[in-house]
Image (tube, rainbow, N blue to C red):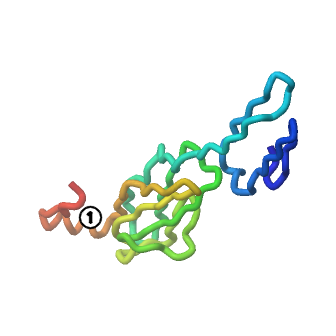
């Protein structure tokens, strides 16, 4: 099955669209060996099997989040920080160099394909200096519980 090509059989012409590349092709032949059924089955929305995890980093350290999919073919990624898109962050991993208290917050990723999209669970990035201050002050942020 080749995207954009036509398959001929018993007078039947079937056009395979270029968008079929990320889809499963289901085809059958009649008793004479002629192609008689072609169905483009949607691969379905992406399935996340590995969620981003909570991170604790020291100021100036590197922090990273990642997501793992059951099938990563034909998908796009958009990372979010506190619910807002992070420009230019479209891969399966997000790396933050030289973290500071400005980076502390909630991170998630939206993964999409032609069939739809799914949003990961939210992972918190804590900056260690802030965690120590909470412990010394005797209060833990309720979002961490």
Closest to the observer: 15 or 55? 15
Please provide percent x and percent y for residue 140: 18, 61
Q: Residue furthest front?
A: 11
Residue receiving disc 1: 131
Could you say where residue 28 lies in the image, as x and y percent from the top left?
74, 31
In percent of the image, x 40 and y 53: which residue is there?
53
Above or below, 128 relative to 13: below
Q: Which residue, as the protein is rendered here, is positioned at the far left?
A: 138
- Residue drawn at x 37%, y 70% is 83
Tell me: 45 left or right of 104: right
Q: Position of residue 56 (x, y in %)?
A: 37, 60
Hey, which quadrant is residue 139 in on the image? bottom left
The C terminus lies in which quarter of the figure? Answer: bottom left
Task: Out of 21 and 133, give the one closest to the viewer.
Answer: 21
**Quadrant position of residue 32:** top right
| Mark 1 nearby-residue class (10 Å; few <14, some 14–19, many ≥20) | some
Q: Nearer the viewer, residue 20 or 91?
A: 20
Q: Secondary structure at mark 1?
A: helix
Question: In the orientation shown, which residue stands out farthest toward the top?
Answer: 31
């Amino acid at each position: 099955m080749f995207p954009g090509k036509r398959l001929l059989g018993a007078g039947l012409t079937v056009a395979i669209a270029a968008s079929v590349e990320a889809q499963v092709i289901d085809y059958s032949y009649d008793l004479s060996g002629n192609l008689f059924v072609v169905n483009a089955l949607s691969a379905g929305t992406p399935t996340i099997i590995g969620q981003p995890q909570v991170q604790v980093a020291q100021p100036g350290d590197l922090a990273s989040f990642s997501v793992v999919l059951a099938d990563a073919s034909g998908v796009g990624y958009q990372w979010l920080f506190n619910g807002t898109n992070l420009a230019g962050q479209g891969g399966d991993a997000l790396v933050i160099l030289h973290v500071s208290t400005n980076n502390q917050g909630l991170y998630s990723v939206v993964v999409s394909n032609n069939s739809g999209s799914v949003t990961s669970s939210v992972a918190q990035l804590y900056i260690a200096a802030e965690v120590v201050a909470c412990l010394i002050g005797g209060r833990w942020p309720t979002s961490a519980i």
